[in-house]
Image: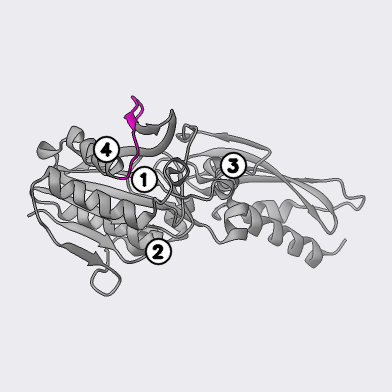
Amino acid sequence: MSRIYLSQQTDPYFNVAAEYQLFKQTREDISLFLWRNRPSVIIGRNQNIFAECNTQFLKARGISPVRRLSGGGAVFQDLGNLNYTFLSREEDADKEKYIKVIRGAMMSMGVECTFSGRNDLLAGGRKFSGQAYYADHGNLLYHGTLMINVDLDMMAGALHPSFIKLSSKGIESVKSRVVNLSDICEGITAQRAAAALINAFKMEYDTDLSVQPLNKANMQPAAFRKISSDEWIYGQAPDFDVKFERKLSFGNACIYTDVSVGRITRLKVYTDSLVEIDFTQFEREAAGHLFDEDKLAVQLESYVAKIGT
């Protein structure tokens, strides 16, 4: 039976896990899921989070890093985004109908849009929505975002890698020129866009379904704990080599690391300190730990203070 779901939560870990659970439970017909996230960066399953975004920027501004269970590129989301997912059995999936629903919703709000060959929806030649799909065990989800009133400065800062040098073996996102729908057509809000999508969906599929709210009281997604864990977010990163610098109390430190499956396999520290420091023990003990630039810097500072200079 078809359903229309609307999340009442803005927790990106809940919403990504809820989407996956709805996907796994798909049996017949077509369903629509809509949700919004607090500021977050959502990356694909096979991407390197350190190559896709500035993890220090994220931490400083309370932006949540999220790794979804499906593939695709990295996207910044905040409450100025509206996310949508079409869910069906794989044999019943109809991408043309999904696009028709989105176009119908946009037209009802006065937005003319075109579909590009790279799974993007454009208005005036600029991207306001990107789509991707994921199929498994006969089920398919087709999802994307609508940029309503996204903080573009925050997006630029979040999706700009912080490292001086990073050699990644992961899949990198393709950057596109983007635009907010509220800049194209005055009066568009996320709530109005959600209502427009729901109405367009009902018209296309000739149904009068009621909207079912989803929240943490009536749904506990099985994948929530996994998706919100550091092991999943950082430990799934493809192999990479990185160099970064920090100004610490004893001088400038330059740290080289080799990382495999998110964990440090080799680390080397160089410094311009006038005092001779033996980093051998620190370098040896770092092996096997999840890579975290900030933690490494703090641990290095503590190590030097402990051994004395």
Residue placed at 24% from the left, 36% from the top? 99
Residue 117 among magenta residues = yes
Residue under pointer 1: 145
Q: Is residue 235 magenta?
A: no
Q: Quadrant of the C terminus?
A: bottom right
The first of marks 3 and 1 along the sequence is 1
Spatial distance from mark 1 to mark 2, Cα to Cα?
16 Å
**CA separation in Å, label 3 and label 4:** 31 Å
Disc 4: which residue:
103
Contact between marks 2 and 3 (CB within 8 A): the answer is no
Q: Is residue 54 above or below residue 191?
A: above
Q: For the residues carrying marks 4 and 1, which lies nearer the camera in this image? A: 4
Comes first in the chain, label 3 or label 4: 4
What is the number of the mark on residue 11?
2
Which quadrant holds residue 208? Answer: bottom left
Question: Mark 4 is on which residue type?
Answer: Arg
Label ID, residue 12: none
The residue furthest right is 274
Would residue 74 appear left or right of 61 to someone viewing this image?
Answer: left
Q: CA distance from mark 4 to mark 1?
A: 13 Å
The percent position of residue 105, horizontal first and vertical second, equals 26, 44
Q: Which residues are magenta?
A: 109-119
Asked if marks 3 and 1 touch (Cβ < 8 Å), the reply is: no
Pick the quarter of the image with the N terminus: bottom left
Q: Which residue is mark 3?
A: 160
